[in-house]
Amino acid sequence: MSHQLAVAAIGFWHVHAGDYARNVQQHPDTTLVAVWDDDADRGRAAAEEFGVEFVADLDELLARPELDAVTITTATDQHRDVIGRAIAAGKHVFTEKILAPTVEEAQELVDLACEAGVALVVSLPRLYDDYTVAIERVLDEGTLGELTYSRVRLAHDGWVAGWLPEQFADPDAAIGGALTDLGCHPAYLTRLFHRAEPLSITASYGSVTGRAVEDNAVVTAAFPGGRLGVFEASVVTTPGAFTVELRGTEATLTFGFGGERLLAKGGAFGEDWQELPLPDPRPGAFAQWVQHIHDGTTADENLRHAVELTRMVVASNESAATGRVVELAPVPVA
């Protein structure tokens, strides 16, 4: 790369905003140059923390020719507008999930980025972790048999311990609660493990703390052939938990039950539980983004996951709100 990419951090609404700003500062090919936020006090505080300029006018910042790229962690309901403006200005975009509040808006942003020749990447970090790489290898080898049932749960104590910001309880800004934000990770992993698009979604939400959005969520996705995938999220669970359970016609895999270990049993793995080695993780989403900018390529797989994740989240929210099963239309093959 001929020069370090000049990157601005757009919005500090989301809890991961600081993480992505640190990613920019720590990557050898990127440098953080500015911060913008629609809340000027929040933006100035972030700019001071990271030792960069606060810019009050987003359009003025995006118009700077020396600015190459942006990370976007605004409120979710601002994604379509802010990401669209960044793409129109020719800036590469790394953004927090979900990509947009609707499937149509998500696909529109993908198409706009492609037409503009800018790299758009959505942070879906668990696609690239070591346990995911190991599980995919088992699925590819066929030693699990046919996957008939999966369960992926992600939970933390954010609204028990009081560290999750209250803006996450705003149903308009956040476009939902625990499932829309935290449940994204179990959702896209469920789709990945089943190697198919869900046919229908059934969701049940609860609010233990009485906020306007759910803090407990369980969703069942029906896949072709009668297979079921359950994905769950909670922000009222102590201690936090990340667990994976995959049941096949020949064997079973589990991860995270009582330790960060991937265990297998049945079929080729034998009658006793055995621990499987975890390989190196794949490059993370941020590193992939920088590489796509460098290579002038498109993050096709990441963006397909991002659009289909939006489809699953929207269907889950609709099912929980209506109490009905939401049937999903077949996804066209690109």
Image (spheres, rainbow, N blue to C red):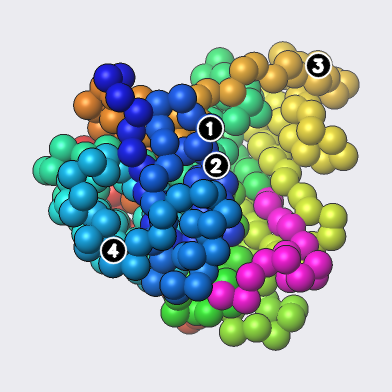
Q: Position of residue 1 (x, y in %)?
A: 30, 19
Does the stretch in magenta take in 290?
Answer: no
Residues at badges 2 and 1 in contact (C-beta under 8 Å)?
yes
Q: Return the mark for residue 174.
A: none
Q: Decide which of tag 4 and tag 2 comes sooner along the chain.
A: 2
Q: Which residue is mark 4?
A: 58
The amino acid type, in three-letter code, at marker 3 is: Gly
Visible in this render: residue 120? no
Q: Secondary structure at mark 1?
A: helix
Residues at badges 4 and 2 in contact (C-beta under 8 Å)?
no
Q: Nearer the viewer, mark 3 or mark 2?
A: 2
Q: Which residue is mark 3?
A: 270
Q: CA distance from mark 3 to mark 1?
A: 44 Å
Q: Which residue is mark 1?
A: 26
Instruction: Quarter of the image for the C terminus: give it.
Output: top left
* Residue at (28% x, 63% y) in the render: 58
